[in-house]
Amino acid sequence: MDAGEEKLYWAESRMGIISKIRKRFIDEMPFKNLKIGMALHLEAKTGILAKTLKAGGADISITSCNPLTTDDDVARALSKEMKVYAKRGQSREEYYESLNKVLDNNPDIIIDDGGDLTTILHKEREMKILGGNEETTTGVQRLRIMEKEGVLRFPMFDVNDAQMKHLFDNRYGTGQSTLDGIMSTTNILIAGKNIVVAGYGWCGKGIALRMKGMGARVTVTEVDPVKAVEAYMDGFYVKKMEDAIKDADIVITATGMIDVVREEHFKLAKDKCIFANAGHFDVEINKDHLLSLSKEKRTVRKYVDEYILKDGKKLYLLGEGRLINLVGGQGHPVEIMDLSFSIQALTAEYIVMNQEKLERKVYPVPKDIDINVANISREIFNIGLDELNDKQKKYMESWNFGT
């Protein structure tokens, strides 16, 4: 096996849920004579999803959803059995060219991450799409705006908010993989560091939890008063960014918002502060502001750029401000993506089975798909589960209960 095939083999060996789904797909061929276009972080776990859909009869075309998150070894291995249009380190032009090449194959179903493929379909292309899936928070936010404005042209499923996705992928997956990305690119000690986590959604929660577990002193910044109180109750310091950044050794953004860290914050940061982003787009840490404050910029380590400010202070940006867990690390753990991609596969099948009644709106993942994936997970992880007996069920169905 070559390097890509080895990575695919290892991922598949740890993805028992989607492997079980694939066996059924091979028997039933739900995607026979259909084309599926995919824009996801193209690495080994994604490859197993693509191979599973292909095993179910689909003609697959795939690219990455980020210029820096393709594993070239995996891309080469997958190109032997499907159309692959991706490489690591694409320019902006190459990135959008690859997305358009996926659409040139006239897919019936799309599977998107971040919404770029969907946006191109609505702004530049005209084709019939049965429906699609969106995997991440940023992409779902874009879809909901499109639905609200009445411009969404085909049904899309919000995979991100499926319980078996965001409770595990966003929290445990992002938490571990962000830690992995930062440690891999910097080789620094986490214990004892002052770390600022911007955003306390599911991703921010996971990052803060993992950093705390490694011995860091964690401060959270938030714009949502409820989440701010939640972070406080979870045992974290909660401050404004302008206050938190003064003592920060590492700042990690996970908000989906632009300019979370900007000029005034860079000026307040201490010497040798490290900045990393775990949000989908490279807009959370304002790179233009950082560059304008600097007299020199140089790469001092792979995916570590040193900015020497005009006052002599040095600040460090990891992975060009892009997703550090995939740029600097290996992405989410295999078992986590087994959950998320199983949701993706079953939801794609649901689109095929229900295409005649789906409207041009954003749908939640059907609950029975969530429960199905949870039950297969239980079997694989050997998790026991109690059941209510008839007396207990009757008790729960009655309003006349108590002592």
Image: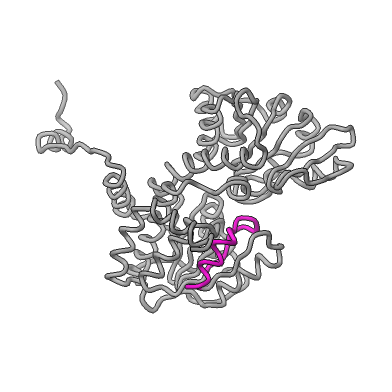
Tally of marks: 0
On the rendered structure, is 204 left or right of 345? right
Q: Residue at x 71, y 47 (%)?
A: 302
**367 or 36: nearer the viewer:** 36
**240 or 72: nearer the viewer:** 72
- Location of residue 117 in the rendering, given as x and y in whole percent from the top left corner: 57, 65
**211 or 203: nearer the viewer:** 211
What span is in magenta? 62-82
What's the colour scheme?
one colour
Does any portion of residue 256 appear in the rendered image? no
Q: Quadrant of residue 312?
A: top right
Q: Is residue 81 magenta?
A: yes
Q: Is 312 drawn above or below residue 140 in the view shown? A: above
Q: Residue furthest front?
A: 1
Q: Is residue 231 magenta?
A: no
Q: Quadrant of the C terminus?
A: top left
Q: Quadrant of residue 342?
A: bottom left
On the rendered structure, is 278 left or right of 344? right
- Location of residue 213 in the rendering, given as x and y in whole percent from the top left corner: 51, 27
Q: Residue furthest left?
A: 391
Q: Residue at x 56, y 59 (%)?
A: 115
- Location of residue 400 in the rendering, given as x and y in whole percent from the top left corner: 14, 30
- Location of residue 289 in the rendering, given as x and y in whole percent from the top left corner: 80, 43
On the rendered structure, is 97 left or right of 403? right
Q: Residue furthest top?
A: 403
Q: Is 316 drawn above or below residue 220 in the view shown? A: below
Q: Residue at x 51, y 39 (%)?
A: 176
Does any portion of residue 92 appear in the rendered image? yes
Q: Residue at x 69, y 28 (%)?
A: 248
